[in-house]
C-alpha cells in the first residue's frame, strides 16, 4: 500500500525550537519518534549537514516509504528508521543508539501525535468515515497485538462502548450510540466504516445531523484511541524520554485534542519538579499553528506544541525569561 503525501504540522516551529541550542559545527542527534511521511525527520537533515536523526514508526506503509526515501535521497549514513512503537524507544535507544548516549544524549526529541493524512485517505485502513472500508484503525495493521475497531465494536459490552465514546470522544450521545450498536450487531456484525457511520448518524437528532462536524467524528476518534492504546502509550513514554536528552536538549510534543494535551501538560508539570533529571517548561501556553498554516492544512487547526528543556540543575523562576509560546 503506497504512502500518500503528508503535511508536517508546525514543522518550522518544531525544527527551530529543537535545534536552537545545537552546536552548528559538531554532530548533534535528534529523534523523530513519529516518522510518518518523514517531513520532520528530513527537515532536521536539511537544517545542518552534521545533524543525525533516529526515527521510529510502527506503520508498515510509513516504514516502506521511509526506507525507499532514505535510499533514494542518499542519506542512509545520517538517519536510521526503526520499526517500533515509540513507547519502546527508551529501551531501544540504550541498545541501538549507543553512539548517541556516548555523545551525551539527544539534542532534541519530537513526538507528533497526529494521525497522518495517509491514514485518513486510505479507505483500507478504516480510520475515516469518508470512505467505505473495513473497520480496522490499527497503526500497525500487521500486528495481532491490538484489537481492530471491528472487534471492539462487536465484542465490547454496552457499558464499555459508552465509556470509551464518552471519555475518549467526549460524545454527548454515547449511551444512545452504544445501545444502538449492540442492537444492530445482534442482527449482523458491524464490519465496515459505512455501517458504523450510518448507525451513529441516525442516533443524532435530525436537526444536528448536518452541522460543520460529522456526527461520527468523535466516536471514530474514540475507537482509534482505544484500538492503538494511544493515551496509555503516551503516558508511559514521556517521562522515560527525558533521561535520553543531553543537557540543553529539548523534548517537543504535538497533540491534537484536549485529552492528549492534558496528559502532556500534566506530565511536563510533574517532570519540572524532578531533582534527578531537572527540566524547564519552555511553553507556558502551547504553540499553535498560524492562520497561513491552517489555510494550507485545515487538519492542523487543533494542533498544540509543548516543549521542555533538560537542565543541569533545577532553575529558579525568572520572570524575565522569554516564553517560546509568546
Image: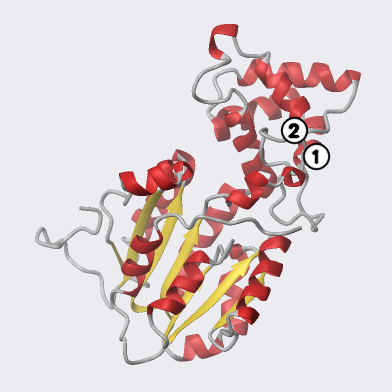
Visible in this render: residue 245? no
Visible in this render: residue 321? yes
Residue extending farthest to the left is 320
**Labels 1 and 2: the sequence-earlier one:** 1
Q: How many marks?
A: 2
Residue hosting label 1: 134
Give the percent coordinates (x, y) of residue 65: 67, 67
Say which quadrant the N terminus sits in.
bottom right
Q: Could you say which disc has been placed on residue 193 in the image?
A: 2
Give the percent coordinates (x, y) of residue 130: 66, 33
Residue shown at 49%/86% (left/top)? 100
Residue shown at 71%/35% (left/top)? 131
Q: Secondary structure at mark 2?
A: helix
Instruction: Give above or below for 32 relative to 301.
Output: below
**Marks 1 and 2: CB-CB under 8 Å?**
yes
Quadrant for residue 61, please give it. bottom right
Amino acid at each position: 500500500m503506497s504512502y500518500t503525501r503528508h503535511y508536517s504540522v508546525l514543522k518550522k516551529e518544531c525544527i527551530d525550537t529543537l535545534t536552537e541550542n545545537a552546536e552548528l559545527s559538531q554532530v548533534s542527534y535528534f529523534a523523530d519518534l513519529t516518522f510518518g511521511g518523514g517531513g520532520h525527520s528530513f527537515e532536521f537533515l536539511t537544517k545542518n549537514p552534521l545533524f543525525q536523526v533516529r526515527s521510529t514508526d510502527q506503520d508498515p506503509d510509513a516504514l516502506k516509504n521511509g526506507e525507499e526515501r532514505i535510499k533514494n535521497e542518499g542519506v542512509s549514513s545520517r538517519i536510521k528508521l526503526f520499526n517500533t512503537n515509540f513507547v519502546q524507544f527508551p529501551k531501544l535507544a540504550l541498545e541501538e543508539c549507543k553512539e548517541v548516549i556516548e555523545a551525551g544524549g539527544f539534542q532534541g526529541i519530537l513526538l507528533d501525535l497526529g494521525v497522518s493524512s495517509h491514514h485518513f485517505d486510505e479507505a483500507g485502513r478504516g480510520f475515516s468515515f469518508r470512505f467505505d472500508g473495513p473497520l480496522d484503525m490499527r497503526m500497525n495493521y500487521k500486528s495481532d497485538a491490538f484489537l481492530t475497531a471491528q472487534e471492539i465494536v462487536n465484542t465490547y459490552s454496552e457499558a464499555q462502548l459508552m465509556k470509551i465514546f464518552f471519555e475518549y470522544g467526549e460524545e454527548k450521545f454515547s449511551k444512545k450510540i452504544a445501545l444502538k450498536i449492540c442492537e444492530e450487531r445482534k442482527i449482523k456484525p458491524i464490519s465496515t466504516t459505512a455501517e458504523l457511520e450510518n448507525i451513529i448518524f441516525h442516533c443524532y437528532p435530525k436537526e444536528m445531523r448536518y452541522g460543520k462536524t460529522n456526527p461520527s467524528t468523535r466516536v471514530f476518534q474514540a475507537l482509534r484511541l482505544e484500538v492503538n492504546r494511544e493515551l496509555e502509550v503516551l503516558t508511559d513514554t514521556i517521562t522515560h524520554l527525558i533521561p535520553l536528552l543531553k543537557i540543553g536538549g529539548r523534548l517537543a510534543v504535538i497533540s491534537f485534542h484536549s485529552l492528549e494535551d492534558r496528559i502532556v501538560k500534566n506530565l511536563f508539570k510533574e517532570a519540572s519538579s524532578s531533582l534527578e533529571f531537572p527540566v524547564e517548561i519552555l511553553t507556558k501556553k502551547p504553540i499553535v499553528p498560524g492562520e497561513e498554516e491552517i489555510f494550507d492544512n485545515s487538519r492542523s487547526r487543533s494542533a498544540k506544541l509543548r516543549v521542555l528543556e533538560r537542565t543541569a540543575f533545577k532553575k529558579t523562576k525568572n520572570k524575565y525569561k522569554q516564553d517560546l509560546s509568546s
